[in-house]
Amino acid sequence: MHPIVILGSGLAGYNVARELRKLDQTTPLTIISADSGSFYSKPMLSSAFGSGKTPQSIAMSSAEQMAAQLNATVRAKTSVTAIDTAAHTLSINGEILAYSKLVIALGAEQIRLPIEGNAAGAVMTVNDLDEYANFRAALKEQTTVALIGAGLIGSEFANDLTSGGHTVHVIDIAAWPLARLLPSESGALLQQKLAALGVTWHLETSVTSIDQAGDKLKVTLANATVLDTNVVLSAVGLRPRTMLAQAAGIQTRRGIVINRLHETSAPDVYALGDCIEIEDLLLPYVMPLMTSARALAATLAGKATPVSYPAMPVLVKTPAWPTIVSPPAAGASGAWEITSDAEGLKALFKAADSKLLGFALHGKATAERGALTKELPPVLA
């Protein structure tokens, strides 16, 4: 009997394996990992420095431990070069591996912006544990970091690195941080709180070039500002990993296209996590991933289970100004209603009939998360 094969050992891959083992303890299971196969939570990487977590302490279980826990084969440091959906096989550096069912959980990769300069290649990203280890190694005492991107991950890194004693400059084309998630008043207050912590903001501009200047990096911005830094970290967003699926003839758009059963356009090939697109939605967050893992595991075990997503607020790890956001659906019609005082801010996005469609909560207002979430419509009913 050929195994169920899971491509990817991130939260998506390992959690669907865990959920499957709750329902089926015996079907052969193989997990293929391009890295070490250690189990860890990738969202921890943007808040690990301030809490003193080393790369070694972030990993909760080794590949060998995960294999034992899951009664599975975990193949670490292994790259799949091709999928043959007709033959139900994978190509792995010349080896052919057959599967009964295939789950693609390859996640997303960091978007890299085109930047000029003789040190453009020095830009670092943190998208896995190995990259985090390299980034940590580059940080000396009181390092100056130019951080490209003021979105979710960029804002979290800015808070984390500044609280850890580093000088942080954040550059973004938007007018306020988390511009895709927060209304302007809400984003401006987050900007103020992180500025009070020590973050320097360079908004409504971009990086044009990075050049070596002795032992420093000279970062030139479109507004002619020049920053002398030790490290440049890019956190401008993620792009679903679709190339392997696309090369196999599996339907992709922005992500790997799946239906409510997590089925792709190829027979016996499923997908979940940051690499998927479901009903025009990209949901690169932990809560939808966990919901998907439970539903897909049931389907793999023989009980077809369509996924549905409730409202899923996102906790932004910015302790300097606690933030929870549940943005309205793209294109939703309505307006923000904002109330604030010295201890918190509550922004409610309401339709014309006063129905709550989204919210952003800061400071003491985050205590209202549970009650407000109950009022929100589901992300996917």
Image: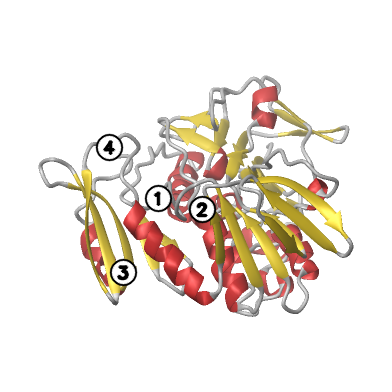
Q: Is tag 2's residue or tag 3's residue first in the polypeptide sequence?
A: 2
Residue at mark 4 = 332
Mark pair 1, 2: CA separation: 8 Å
In this rendered view, identify the residue nearer to me: 93 or 372.
372
Q: Do the residues labelled 4 and 2 touch (CB within 8 Å)?
A: no
Residue at mark 1 = 181
Residue at mark 3 = 366
Q: Answer few, some or many: residues within 10 Å of disc 3's Cα (few below 14, many 20 plus, some between 14 and 19).
A: some
Q: Are marks 1 and 4 in contact (CB under 8 Å)?
A: no
The residue sitting at the front extreme is 224
Residue 205 x, y percent position in the rendering: 57, 47
Q: Are marks 3 and 1 in contact (CB under 8 Å)?
A: no
Residue 358 x, y percent position in the rendering: 27, 50
Residue type at tag 1:
Leu
Residue type at tag 2:
Gly
Residue type at tag 4:
Ala
Residue type at tag 3:
Thr
Q: In which quarter of the image is residue 187?
A: bottom left
